[in-house]
Amino acid sequence: MDSVTISTENLTRRFGELVAVEDVKLRVSSGQFFGFLGPNGAGKSTTIKMLTGLLAPTAGRIQILGLDLIENLVEVKSQIGVVPEGMALFGRLTGSEYLNFVGRMYGLDRDTAARRAAELLEFMQLADQPKTLVTDYSHGMQKKLALAAAVIHGPKVLFLDEPFEGVDAIAAGTLKAMLQRMIARGATVFLTSHVLEIVERLCSHVGIIHRGRLVAQGSLEELRAGVEARIASLPVAAAPGEKLTLEQIFLSTVGGSRSGAQELSWLS
Amino acid sequence: MTPQASQQLIAVLELRWRIFANSLRTVRGRLELASRIFIGVIFVVGGLGGAVALGGAAWFLTSEGNVEWLGTLLWPVFLFWQLFPVLATAFTENIDSSSLLRFPLSYWSYFLIRLAYGSLDPATTVASLWLLGITVGLGVARPKLLPFTVVVLLTFAMVNLLLARMIFAWLERWLAQRRTREILGVVFFLFILGAQIIGPLITLYGHTSKPETTMLGQEVFNAQRPLPPGLAAAALADIVQGQPWASLISLLLLGLYGLGFFLLLNFRLRAQYRGENLSESVARKVTRAEAKTLQRAWNVPGLSAPIAAVFEKELRYLSRSGPMLFTLIVPMFMLLVFRSSGRNQGVFAHAPELTFPLGAAYALLLLTNLCYNNFGSDGSGVQFFFASPVHFRQIMVGKNLAHSCVFVLEVILVWLGTSLLYRPASIEVTLATVVCLLFVLPIDLAAGNLFSIYSPNRIEAGVFGRQRASLTTVLASFVIRGALFGVGAVVLWLSRHYAGSWIIILIFSLLVGLAFTSYVFVLDYIDGIALRQRENLISQLSR
């Protein structure tokens, strides 16, 4: 049986009256490429923030690599890499300075940090602009740099909040290559994304959160099988003989539909 | 103005109002309002007091027939209007034009919005009150000339408004990029060197025969006459003395200044309106070999890797923030102001003894944005600090060390400046000041760390006049420093009266011990405080 890398028990987060995440029980095994999906405002970012120590849960427990997150905050953080919402970059450093800074913050010595920073910049195709400040990078370049920073210390678990948002196909290819390398070396990747095609292609396992509750979790095949069992209620059915796409699974699970467009009085 | 432009202006006003009203939903917003009211009252009192004093002086000069001295009233107004916003950016409101440019805003609406923001800042309000006082004073002395006085002083006000906006717009432009920033730095230092001629000139003429002093005074008078305050004063003086044509010419020249400032401001704002990019993106081309060169982090002996990393990052940030660097050279400017204020007279008879401690204290005040809002320039990067496996106290120590280094450099510069402009401060005063700072700095840093976590404000490091901490924090920092320097002043006073200067070093040594203990005490609790405040910190800095 696979060892569990990320697990939560009754994970709950309230903001005043609003319950953003409620009673979430996640299980992500080591080496999994886990896609965490949900409509806007479903609680994806809140969950990933709690999993990475950026937000305190109102209730519940989080275990990462078998360690309780709250009790072993620093130890857990040293073994994970994070690309949070907004990327958390320092805009007035150059890419190389930023990666060196991050490496040192994760306890790498100067030489190792410098060597890895150079390799990462090369891999991410950012090496040809060593004097450019991060603030002057394009959005795609910033995404690549954020991912490079998240992996510089060789984490065992990667948390990525919308890594493909606003990224062109070329940059997305580089990001995917990096993530696949991480998986190949045994790391676990936990990502949220709106780009269902990418999740479908990359992720082996998926969790779907809706209105703060985890409504589905498992491998793509397991989710597909579950949805096919209640195919009658599917809003967008697959053609006969075709496998259900992740989009269809997702829409079926969260009860969404693309039909029923309303008329706008001033656009008719 | 077209109906659409008026609607846009109204929309911007409503937006400002909504932002203000919504900010009152939080305790922080309400505290900010209280601070704003408190500071507003201080400015209004200063403005009204100045208005009464200047009004009385204007009335006296006109009634006594000494109208040629009206310039002495208009120069302080002019200097305050232009220098205060630059020297005290904490109270200055500037607009982020990029947020407006995405709307279908005509250029002139954009221009007016930029100008309107300028007319709401404290310097404009206070200086306008002073001008109102002068207008009333002149009006009482010469009621028939009131309409013309109003025209002249309104023109003078407009010139000031345009000049202040123009200075801001161009400073922002020059400070935004490394090359222009370096040129500006050189110009500033040349100015400092040039200003040192003032001392020898005063020495040369101050104690010599009366006719030469009078001649110098006449030359200064002639030199200031073609400048805006001189022209406004001349326009008023000439009309009082029954020379309407001369007066009109002065007014016309004043108007030409206004037109010149308008054109320069217009040139700058047009570039902004077209969507210029004031970033450092024009990077030097590098060869492949250079690009391959391994760039290592700094080796800072004695510091752990995370502390050294934060220390390096802070200093790199600071070196790339033109506006912040500009703020840091302001103490030298203040030394010049002290220097040109008087020599061997009154309090200035003890100049080095006063200037060095005062300059050092002022240098500490200028660090408010750094020390009391030390995550301000990190923006969303603050999330990284919470995601990294580093204790928050290490991050704070790294930041505090960097800021302390900057402060020490400032104090050394102030000491050198004092030595150059006057003479070196005595060893007792130097030591007493240093020990006093050793007492003040740790407590100040500890308080700054707490305010940085409880009341963070996002800072745009690359722009001028928008990098301010919250007013609550600014007020609190003033109170804390006031109390700390108050303790210092009491010890100094006691030592002067009862024992002599050396005793204060002993007393301060005890206080220094207490200060460092307080710093360590706050540091011990900072991890827990930061964790409890992380949501507020991240949401305030990431938006």
Image (cartoon, rainbow, N blue to C red):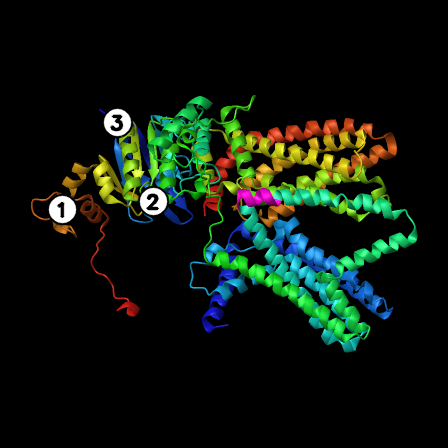
Q: Is residue B182 magenta?
A: yes
In the rendered image of this protein, does residue B153 appear above or below residue A54?
below
Secondary structure category for the residue under label 2: loop
Taking A135 as reference, is B8 above or below it? below
- For the residue pair B253 and B458, the one nearer the viewer reads as B253
Q: Nearer the viewer, mark 1 or mark 2?
A: 2
Q: Chain of mark 1?
A: A
Tag 3: amino acid: Ala
- Circles 1 and 2, Cβ within 8 Å, touching? The answer is no
Q: Which residue is labeled 3 in the image?
A: A184
Question: Magenta stretch?
Answer: B177-184
Query: What is the spatial separation of the Cα atoms under label 1 and label 2, in whole angstroms?
Result: 25 Å
Q: Earlier in the sequence, mark 1 or mark 2?
A: 2
Q: Which residue is mark 2?
A: A43
Q: Residues within 10 Å of mark 1 (few under 14, many from 20)?
A: few
Structural distance between the alpha carbons of marks 3 and 1 = 35 Å
SS label for mark 3: helix
> Which chain is mark 3 on?
A
Instruction: Determine which quarter of the picture holds residue B78.
Output: bottom right
Q: Quadrant of residue B352?
A: top right
Label 3, label 2: how far apart the Cα atoms are: 29 Å
Q: Position of residue B86 (x, y in %)?
A: 64, 51
The x and y percentages for residue A25 are 29, 36
Q: Chain of mark 2?
A: A
Question: Total label count?
Answer: 3
Residue A230's tag is 1
Instruction: Answer whether residue A198 is visible to the viewer in this image.
Output: yes
The residue drawn where x is 44% and y is 22% is: A111
Quarter placement of the C terminus of chain A: bottom left
